[in-house]
């Protein structure tokens, strides 16, 4: 168990010891900002108040239509010599008169105050596409900040010991 613990402690040290790290600078060929359009909404300081009118119409009560039909049928029955025909015409006329009568409408006036909502669209730089060259090969990477004219490169080389075959 102790040997395993010692091995686990020494493993990172031996891994680091077998690596060669070089730092050097390469020229940056191009830097292009990556732009994203961001929408934002916020309430402004200006408040708009106005008076709005709402008109509400009340539906006819079915009892009124039934009452108009009954009254029309009764009057038609009294006036007409043909009782059935007079009752039918009177009932229809009474129902139509009640249906076409003026509806109750109410007008409400309400004061409404609202804060203005302001919409903005702004372009925000979310990164930079950086192009550089190492040993004749072109590389492009996205970075958070603009690196300027030079880019610091970290090169890690692993060294593996090999046995000589004699």
Image (spheres, grey):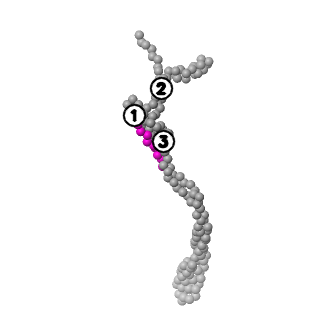
- Of pointers 1 and 2, the one earlier in the residue sequence: 2
Crowding at mark 3 (Cα within 10 Å: few <14, some 14-19, many 20+): some
Disc 1: which residue: 138
Label 1 near label 3: C-beta < 8 Å?
A: no
Disc 2: which residue: 22
Q: Which secondary structure type mostly characterizes the magenta part of the structure?
A: strand
Residue 60 point in image, percent of width and height = 58, 74
Q: Residue furthest top?
A: 166
Q: Secondary structure at mark 1?
A: strand
Spatial separation of the CA atoms under disc 1 and disc 2:
19 Å
Query: Does 114 appear in magenta?
Result: no
The image quadrant of residue 164 is: top left
The residue positioned 48% from the left and 41% from the top of the image is 127
Residue 11 point in image, percent of width and height = 55, 21
Q: Is residue 160 visible?
A: yes
Which quarter of the rendering shows the N terminus? top right
Disc 3: which residue: 127
Spatial separation of the CA atoms under disc 3 and disc 1:
19 Å
């Amino acid at each position: 168990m102790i040997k395993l613990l010692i091995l686990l402690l020494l493993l990172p040290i031996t891994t680091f010891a077998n690596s060669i790290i070089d730092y050097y600078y390469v020229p940056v060929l191009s830097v292009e900002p990556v732009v994203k359009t961001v929408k934002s909404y916020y309430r402004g300081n200006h408040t708009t108040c106005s008076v709005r009118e709402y008109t509400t119409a009340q539906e006819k009560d079915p009892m009124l239509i039934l009452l108009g039909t009954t009254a029309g049928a009764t009057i038609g029955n009294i006036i007409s010599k043909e009782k059935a025909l007079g009752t039918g015409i009177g009932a229809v006329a009474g129902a139509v008169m009640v249906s076409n009568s003026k509806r109750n409408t109410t007008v409400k006036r309400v004061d409404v105050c609202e804060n203005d909502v302001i919409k903005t669209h702004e372009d925000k730089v979310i990164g930079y596409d950086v192009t550089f060259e190492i040993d004749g090969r072109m590389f492009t990477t996205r970075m958070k900040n603009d690196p300027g004219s030079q880019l610091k490169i970290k090169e890690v080389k692993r060294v593996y010991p090999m046995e000589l075959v004699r």
